[in-house]
């Protein structure tokens, strides 16, 4: 199995609206591979996660996006939920933080609705991605090629981009992101 020993992975989430399982299951995959996961948000304190439309648990924020740089992390995970990436794409520091991983050639993994943040960061043009089906038109209009696959690993850019569709794909998503992040 791939190891993330000595690697720190940022998980970027808005203060409210992240799909809890899309945060916790990849987080566990990083931890089980020996990596350090850090929760980055637009505000300090705690974020409110959701189980679709129902409130879930809250999670302590480790770092505020305006106070950190992509240089401090080895990779970025963008969990989904409809409200989470919608809020992030309106925050210039969050968008710039996501874009910085592409500029630095560092791996990024995004699931479900999370590619909305990547569209705002103008990082999907010429890339092949999967996502929740309702993002297909948004991604195509932003210059991406959309595929309906459990996991898509795209190397056609400055970094490796791992994308996945939905919570049912989380096992495959976790395996792919650990494998890709371990090689970075």
Image: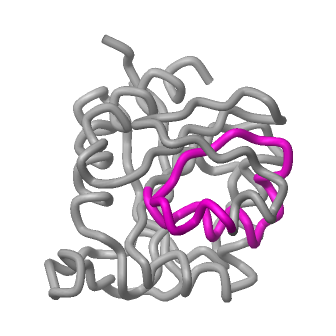
Depth order, front residue of 30/82 = 82
Tell me which corner region of the image, top left, top right, bottom left or bottom right, holds residue 111: bottom left
Q: Is residue 114 magenta?
A: yes
| Quadrant of image for the C terminus | top right
Taking depth in this image into account, of 70 and 153 the one nearest to the observer is 153
Residue at (45% x, 33% y) in the render: 177
Q: Quadrant of residue 112?
A: bottom left
- Residue 116 colored in magenta in the image: yes
Judge whether 104 appears above or below 139 on screen.
above
> Quarter of the image containing the N terminus?
top left
* Residue 183 pos. (x, y %): 57, 18
Residue 33, by quadrant, is top left
Q: Which residues are magenta?
A: 112-137
Question: Would you say 81 lies left or right of 92 here?
Answer: left
Question: Image check: 70 left or right of 82?
Answer: right
Find residue 105 and report its horizontal and vertical position in percent: 78, 37
Q: Residue at x 77, y 47 (%)?
A: 102
Q: Position of residue 146 (x, y in %)?
A: 65, 47
Q: Which of 182 and 162 lies nearest the eye of the viewer?
A: 162
Q: Is residue 110 above or below residue 63?
A: above
- Residue at coordinates 50% horizontally, 42% vertically from top-left? 148
Q: Position of residue 39 (x, y in %)?
A: 41, 64
Horizontal side of 112 relative to 48 (left or right) equals right
| Residue positioned 33% across, 38% down in the render | 30
Spot the residue most to the top. 1
């Amino acid at each position: 199995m791939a190891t993330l020993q000595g690697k720190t992975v940022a998980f970027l989430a808005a203060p409210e609206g992240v799909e809890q399982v899309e945060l916790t299951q990849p987080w566990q995959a990083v931890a089980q591979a020996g990596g350090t996961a850090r929760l980055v948000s637009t505000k300090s304190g705690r974020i409110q996660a959701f189980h679709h439309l129902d409130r879930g648990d809250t999670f302590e924020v480790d770092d505020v996006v305006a106070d950190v740089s992509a240089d401090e992390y080895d990779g970025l995970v963008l969990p989904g939920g409809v409200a989470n990436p919608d809020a992030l794409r309106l925050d210039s520091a969050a968008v710039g933080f996501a874009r910085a991983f592409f500029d630095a050639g560092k791996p990024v993994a995004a699931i479900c609705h999370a590619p909305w943040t990547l569209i705002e960061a103008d990082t999907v043009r010429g890339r092949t991605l999967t996502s929740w089906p309702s993002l297909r038109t948004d991604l195509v209009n932003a210059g991406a090629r959309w595929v309906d696959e459990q996991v898509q690993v795209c190397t056609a850019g400055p970094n490796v981009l791992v994308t996945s569709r939905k919570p049912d794909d989380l096992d495959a998503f976790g395996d792919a992101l650990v494998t890709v992040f371990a090689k970075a």
